[in-house]
Image (tube, rainbow, N blue to C red):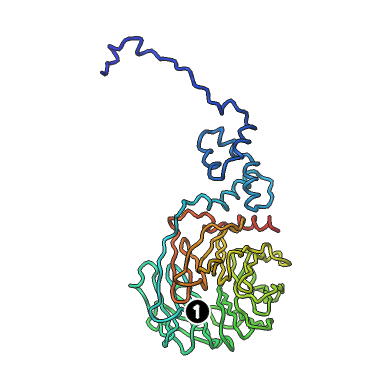
Amino acid sequence: MFTPEIYRPHHLTSKISVPKKENFFSTLPDEIMVYIFSYLSLRNLITVQFVCRRWKAISNASCLWKNFASQAGVITVQDRETWRENVIKCQTFLLCKEGLTPMRKTIYSPWGGISCSALDKKQLVMGIYDRKKTLQVTDLNSFPIRSTILNGERNQTTTALFRSPLIWTGDSSGKISIWNTIEKQHKRTSFSAHKWRISALAQKEQYLLSSSHDTTICLWDIETNLRLFSHQVHQKEVNSAIFVGPFYISGSSDHTIRLFNIKSKEMLVNINAGHPVQCLSSFDTAFISLCNQKIVNHWDTRQTKAPLRIIDTTTFLSVSSIAMHGYAYLIAGINLEKQSVIQIRSIVSDKIALTLSTQEEGPAQKFHIEGDTLISEHKNAIISWKFSEFKLKIWKKAPSSVFNDTINRWI
């Protein structure tokens, strides 16, 4: 029964001193605690930081994080905080909930196979293998309600570039067409760019880059559609062309990767890849190349004598497409169990963070990345992967300064 304070006896109101129970860990010196913490996993090491201030200070010991960084393949750095930041930023995928997968939406093409695709501001453009050779523009948030069909050309569209509201497409005859999704007459203009099939289109600021199977690479002015420069330096078809920092790069079946300066238009570097180059993908000053459906190399424009890393693809029978984003590699192909999969790997550790199954749709032919959305292009379908609820830190776009620091340590 509750007794009011005024009537409460003195022996109940006086403070009773309870002897403190001594904590065993508080009697141990810091060196012993560090030794104990060295047996913890990465997940548990991060968890113990929330116990008390002393444990947080001890768990930040450089030797603890150095062990995890060396396991992850992070090259030696001096600063303790740098150890910790690199491990947390590049290894946090180990903390993902088991069984958690990104939200998936599959868009099948009812009219025919998909020849190309491009993404911009949650809008997707697809080139369709049908008699009319149409282009379909789709809003990913409301598919299939909001779709626009653009009349196609005589020749099949082989590549597309989307910068809303404009779309640039290249076809099998070497022609580049420009479309506007807002105007009623969607097609603005078209011009002959190459003699044969256009393999890739890329855009940076006022420049448009095109490559073709006629062994040429062309640099264009977007506003005037005038050809600024044309290179015919490859001996065989050019399969890919990209912008990387102040350079543009081409990869060809003649086993070479060539690097050009945007301003001077001069060829600076000729890299012998050793195998036919099928695909290139870039992030900041670095880029990766796919050769011979198996070999994936990581390069840097500041050091091109040899690749910074040969990426592990031993889990694949064949690789169909590659990309890089933030701290992540994306590799698509057929694995050893003969299943179509997409692997997301950490750039620093080259360890697998996540494997996505695409068995029904087949191997991905191309990737598009925007914010928390990954688009994978397949033979007859487009898959949209939503990572908004997926705590994959390596997926987020890293600041260029942080990425450059990582590259510098490799060099």
Which residue is more in the foreground, 172 or 22? 22
- Which residue is the extreme one toward the right? 305
Tell me if I can see residue 268 in this picture: no
Q: Which residue lies furthest to the left in this view?
A: 1
The residue that appears at 65% across and 55% down in the rendered structure is: 405
Q: Which of 147 and 61 is in front in this view?
A: 61
Q: Quadrant of residue 38?
A: top right
- Is residue 371 at all visible to an observer of this figure? yes
Query: Quarter of the image containing the N terminus?
Result: top left
For badge 1, the amino acid type reads Trp
Instruction: From the top left corner, tell me how far across and down residue 189 is, in percent.
Output: 48, 85
Location of residue 318 by image quarter = bottom right
Q: Where is residue 171 in the image (x, y as percent from the top left)?
A: 52, 84
In this rendered view, identify the residue nearer to me: 29 or 165. 29
Residue designated by label 1: 168
Q: In this view, does 172 lie above or below 85?
A: below
Q: In which quarter of the image is the C terminus?
A: bottom right
Residue at left offset 27%, top offset 11%: 7
Q: Is mark 1 on a helix, strand or loop?
A: strand
